[in-house]
Image: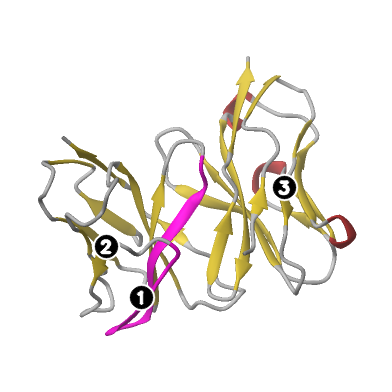
Amino acid sequence: DGGITQSPKYLFRKEGQNVTLSCEQNLNHDAMYWYRQDPGQGLRLIYYSQIVNDFQKGDIAEGYSVSREKKESFPLTVTSAQKNPTAFYLCASSAGTGGYNEQFFGPGTRLTVL
Amino acid sequence: AQSVSQHNHHVILSEAASLELGCNYSYGGTVNLFWYVQYPGQHLQLLLKYFSGDPLVKGIKGFEAEFIKSKFSFNLRKPSVQWSDTAEYFCAVRSNYQLIWGAGTKLIIKP
């Protein structure tokens, strides 16, 4: 089945530690995205990548980093510089970034900082 | 900055009631508009989208939305809801390469 997988589903981290969230897609999509979702708020874009070896900051990139070494993978690192990292993180992909392209979503990772 | 506003955060309806969820956006240029839905325990998925042409757009599961340019609105409608429509609904507007999202509306259908 084609789709997007995110792991782990739940993640706990101590303050001051970096943590990496995994996102893999087998849809052969060029574009991938990371969003953060907080209660009562819409999704906010952290980073996006239009093509391998390229990525751009979204609205709330501070304290996060990404890489795009392979087309199918777009891992997100939440660094200790992120002041409020506890949230639900969603990964998405689309065939391109143009207006016609639907974004497909993974199941999400819930990160809790202890 | 562009923004998307969904007026109702929680809506409770009985089965067979009619549904309208409001969505207003601030972007004044050419827009691409989307409604996504997240059923309990499932991924976010596309419900319907508008790019151009007929402002009345039909989506999956009997949903439709009307784009009213003069009101900057893209309201979601369904004539008769079912218990299985219980979900969270998100409106989104494309701005350059990004989607700008509303805060979502949690819809609960009472059987």
Image depth: mark 3 or mark 2 in front: 2
- Residue A28 is labelled as 1
Percent position of residue B88, x then y:
55, 37
Left/right of residue A5 with respect to residue B21 in the rendered view: left
Please name the residue shown 79% across and 53% down the image.
B73
- Stretch in magenta: A41-59
The answer to if A57 sits in the magenta stretch is yes
- The kind of secondary structure element at disc 3 is loop
Question: How far apart are labels 3 and 2 at the CA level?
Answer: 30 Å
The residue that disc 2 covers is A64
- Host chain of mark 3: B
Please name the residue shown 69% across and 52% down the image.
B59
Image depth: mark 2 or mark 1 in front: 2
- Host chain of mark 2: A
- In the image, farthest residue toward the top: B111
The residue that disc 3 covers is B23
Q: Is residue B1 above or below residue A9?
A: below
Q: Is residue A20 above or below residue B82?
A: below
Please name the amino acid that badge 2 sits on. Answer: Tyr
Please name the residue shown 62% across and 64% down the image.
B1
Q: Are marks 3 and 2 in contact (CB under 8 Å)?
A: no
- Host chain of mark 1: A
Q: Nearer the viewer, residue B52 or B92?
A: B92
- The kind of secondary structure element at disc 2 is strand
Please name the amino acid that badge 3 sits on. Answer: Cys
Q: Are marks 1 and 3 in contact (CB under 8 Å)?
A: no
Please name the amino acid that badge 1 sits on. Answer: Asn
- The kind of secondary structure element at disc 1 is loop
- Residue A89 is labelled as none
